[in-house]
């Protein structure tokens, strides 16, 4: 199977599993990921992993688990956990009692990129992404447009995810927004979320 066919197969698998689990893009978050993991019999463990390693899939004699960095924000954590689902569905026979180190692209480049393709399609299918772009009606993009699109699309994805998709579709140049601090830009445009405002945490605590 060549690379394109491999990726197409993983996109098809992502679609099948979305249907199987009744995934709704706008409502898909950590609660839904945990439900899928419980059904699949995969345990989530929080480990102090190396900085560049977001998650690891391990399966030994049917005991399957994923180690994930606890402090990851929800969006990259969701992507990492769905990334590991691909290993669960497709890579277990090759693993034996070992593990796939998700930061080791040199040794497992095709396997790891395939997991990225699966996760991206599972969380926010390219067809849905393209339809949302058509509604947005933009011919040229500035960083502010990425912020507006992310807030409007409903999918729980990172700014990096959106930029990669825009690059993949040829809408922006590779690396065009490299170095842009999108979260800071979002705060400048819309203000910080309530829980980050001064006193917000204390107020929330006092009213519970």
Image (cartoon, rainbow, N blue to C red):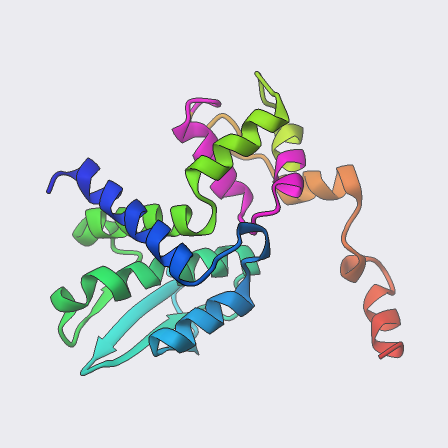
Q: Magenta segment range?
A: 148-173
The N terminus: image quadrant: top left
The vertical placement of 114 against 178, above or below, is: below
Residue 107: image location, x then y, percent: 17, 53
- The residue lying at 76 percent from left, 54 percent from top is 193
Residue 5: image location, x then y, percent: 18, 39
Tell me if 197 is positioned left or right of 31 in this view: right
Residue 171 visible in the current orientation: yes
Is 81 in front, or is 185? 81
Is 69 in front, or is 5? 5
Q: Is residue 17 magenta?
A: no
The vertical placement of 134 against 75, above or below, is: above
- The residue lying at 43 percent from left, 63 percent from top is 21
- The residue lying at 33 percent from left, 63 percent from top is 85
Is 58 in front, or is 13? 13
Tell me if 29 is positioned left or right of 170 in this view: right
Tell me if 97 is positioned left or right of 45 in this view: left
Residue furthest to the top: 139
Q: Is residue 166 magenta?
A: yes
């Amino acid at each position: 199977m060549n690379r394109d066919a491999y990726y197409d197969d993983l996109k098809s698998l992502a679609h099948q599993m979305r249907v199987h689990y009744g995934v709704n893009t706008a409502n898909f978050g950590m609660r839904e990921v945990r439900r899928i993991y419980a059904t699949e019999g995969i345990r989530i463990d929080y480990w102090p992993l190396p900085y560049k390693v977001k998650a690891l899939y391990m399966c030994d004699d049917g005991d399957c688990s994923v180690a994930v960095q606890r402090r990851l924000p929800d969006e990259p954590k969701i992507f990492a956990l769905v990334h590991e689902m691909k290993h669960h569905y497709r890579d277990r026979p090759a693993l034996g009692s070992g593990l796939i180190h998700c930061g080791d692209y040199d040794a497992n480049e095709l396997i790891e990129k395939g997991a990225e393709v699966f996760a991206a399609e599972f969380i926010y299918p390219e067809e849905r992404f393209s339809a949302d772009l058509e509604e947005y009606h933009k011919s040229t993009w500035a960083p502010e447009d990425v912020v507006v699109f992310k807030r409007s699309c409903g999918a729980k994805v990172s700014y990096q995810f959106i930029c990669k998709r825009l690059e993949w579709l040829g809408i922006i140049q590779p690396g065009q927004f490299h170095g842009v601090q999108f979260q800071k830009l979002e705060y400048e445009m819309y203000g910080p979320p309530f829980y980050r405002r001064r006193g917000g945490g204390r107020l929330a605590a006092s009213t519970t």
